């Protein structure tokens, strides 16, 4: 049995415990675990929706999740470039900024892990 999600509690639990519970129980434990689509496909769909809707707060963690779900960096770049023509140039340029920050965070984390060894 998979462990219950707790990200909602971590992010919203102090201010909105019911919202946090719904985030964990329904969104992450039920919707994200449905078998109809692969986690990789769900990540691509989610990132596309977040870019198109200009949801800049939610985008970075979902870019990270997409990478961990097997979406390549090149695929994310192409996805965002493609969306520029359907969702607007400003949404794509903002998403590329978020992707840059995720890449920099990942590079810094890799360097830190290398120094710890």
Image (spheres, helix red, strand yellow):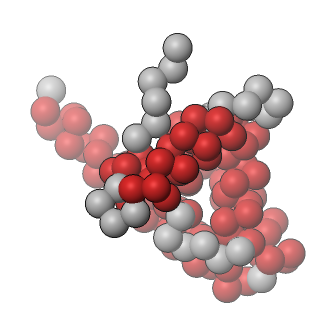
Q: Is residue 27 visible?
A: yes
Q: Is residue 15 above or below residue 115?
A: below
Q: Which residue occupies the foreground of this view, 31 or 78? A: 31
Residue at the spot 85% in from the left edge and 77% down from the top edge: 85
Is 53 situated above or below 41? below
| Residue found at x 49% / y 58% | 19
Relative to 9, residue 54 above or below: below
Determine the residue positioned at 71% across, 74% down. 53
Residue 50 % position (x, y): 66, 66
At which x and y percent is residue 58? 53, 64
Residue 113: x and y, percent? 22, 36
Image quadrant for the C terminus?
A: top left
Relative side of 75 to 110, left or right: right
Say if residue 71 shows up in the picture: no
Which of the 4 image quarters holds residue 101? bottom left
Q: Position of residue 82 (x, y in %)?
A: 81, 66
Camera-side residue of 92 and 44: 44
Picture layout, residue 65 above or below residue 114: below
Pick out the residue farthest to the top.
1
Is residue 3 rendered to the left or right of residue 68? left
């Amino acid at each position: 049995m998979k462990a219950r999600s707790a990200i909602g509690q971590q992010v919203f639990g102090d201010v909105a415990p019911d919202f946090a519970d719904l985030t964990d129980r329904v969104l992450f434990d039920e919707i994200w675990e449905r078998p109809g689509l692969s986690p990789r496909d769900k990540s691509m769909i989610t990132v596309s929706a977040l870019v198109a809707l200009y949801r800049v707060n939610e985008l970075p963690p979902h870019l990270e999740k997409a990478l961990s779900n097997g979406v390549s960096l090149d695929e994310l770049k192409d996805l965002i470039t493609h969306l520029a023509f359907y969702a607007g140039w400003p949404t794509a340029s903002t998403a590329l900024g978020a992707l840059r920050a995720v890449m920099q965070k990942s590079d810094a984390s890799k360097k830190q892990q290398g120094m710890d060894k």
